[in-house]
């Protein structure tokens, strides 16, 4: 029953966040509220802070991992920007049209307090801990990663028209939507496996959260900066 309740909360949050209603503040509030409910369900299920990777020792371990992970992501992104062909990855209409203040909101508020908070608590925290206790680490990683991939089904529908590299690969029109969504779900399932393994190795939820924030936060910032600071050659 607790796992069913977690799934219901995530379905509701996903539908709300991908509907036309609301705005950036509503998104963060929805994620925060869903996170609070998930933590209550975890407590009902008997999970401890250590089970979730949020005990004091786990947080300290995660904070040691965080700068290394964030620095690695930033280095990879900068290497991509140094290559003209790599800059197409950062040609994204979702970020290019933002103001400087909106970029800061995305990178410092929406991503960490909305996207990362909910997704890491849900998929590498509550679901992973529930699955691990019942069926073992491998089962927990497989199921939570698959659900993480499916979580991105709705958000990826317009990706081929928003991102130049994706549009080039799959086509920017309606015909490219299906392949884009399928590949996005598979890619996010793979990313989920990586984040779960990082959660296991670090013994902390902070480590995958730091990696997740770095990928999304630096991604937004550099997609905004790329056409301004690294114009096409």
Image: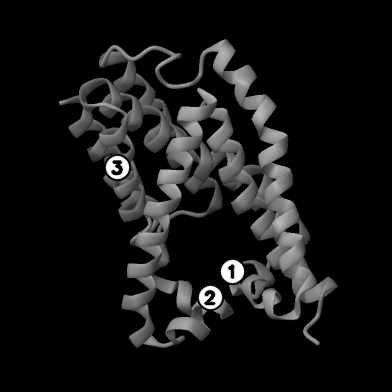
State the SS at label 3: helix
Taking the spot 47% from the left edge, 72% from the top edge, the residue there is 159
The quadrant where residue 2 appears:
top left
Circle 2 residues within 10 Å: few <14, some 14–19, many ≥20: some
Residue 174 versus residue 130: which sits nearer the camera? Answer: 130
The quadrant where residue 124 appears:
top left
**CA–CA distance between discs 1 and 3?**
31 Å
Query: In the rendered image, which residue does mark 2 sit on?
Result: 162
Circle 1 residues within 10 Å: few <14, some 14–19, many ≥20: some
The single residue placed furthest to the left in the displayed view is 1
Which mark identifies residue 142? 3
Circle 3 residues within 10 Å: few <14, some 14–19, many ≥20: some
Q: Is residue 5 above or below residue 52?
A: below
Taking the spot 31% from the left edge, 54% from the top edge, the residue there is 150
**Of tags 1 and 3, which is closer to the observer?**
3
Which mark identifies residue 12? none
Is 74 placed left or right of 230 in the picture? left
Which mark identifies residue 94? 1
Q: How is the image coloured?
A: one colour
Task: Looking at the image, tell me whether mark 2 or mark 1 is earlier in sequence order.
Answer: 1
The single residue placed furthest to the right in the displayed view is 229
Q: Do the CB atoms of the residues marked 3 and 2 lie less than 8 Å apart?
A: no
Q: Do the CB atoms of the residues marked 2 and 1 lie less than 8 Å apart?
A: yes
State the SS at label 1: helix
State the SS at label 2: helix
């Amino acid at each position: 029953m607790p796992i069913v309740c977690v799934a219901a909360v995530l379905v509701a949050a996903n539908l709300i966040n991908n509907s036309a209603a609301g705005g950036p503040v509503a998104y963060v509030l929805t994620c925060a509220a869903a996170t609070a409910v998930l933590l209550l369900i975890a407590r009902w299920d008997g999970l401890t802070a250590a089970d979730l990777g949020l005990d004091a020792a786990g947080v300290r371990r995660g904070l040691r991992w965080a700068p290394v992970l964030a620095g690695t992501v930033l280095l990879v992104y900068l290497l991509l920007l140094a290559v003209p062909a790599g800059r197409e990855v950062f040609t994204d209409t979702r970020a290019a049209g933002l103001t400087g203040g909106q970029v800061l909101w995305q990178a410092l508020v929406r991503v960490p307090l909305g996207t990362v908070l909910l997704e890491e608590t849900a998929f590498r925290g509550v679901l992973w801990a529930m699955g691990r206790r019942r069926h073992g680490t491998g089962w927990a990683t497989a199921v939570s990663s698959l659900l993480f991939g499916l979580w991105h089904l709705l958000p990826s529908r317009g990706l081929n028209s928003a991102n130049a590299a994706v549009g080039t690969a799959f086509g920017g029109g309606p015909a490219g939507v299906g392949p884009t969504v399928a590949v996005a779900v598979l890619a996010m399932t793979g990313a989920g496996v990586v984040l779960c393994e990082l959660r296991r190795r670090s013994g902390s939820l902070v480590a995958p959260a730091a990696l997740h924030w770095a990928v999304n936060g630096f991604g937004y910032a550099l997609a905004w900066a790329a056409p301004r600071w690294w114009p096409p050659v």
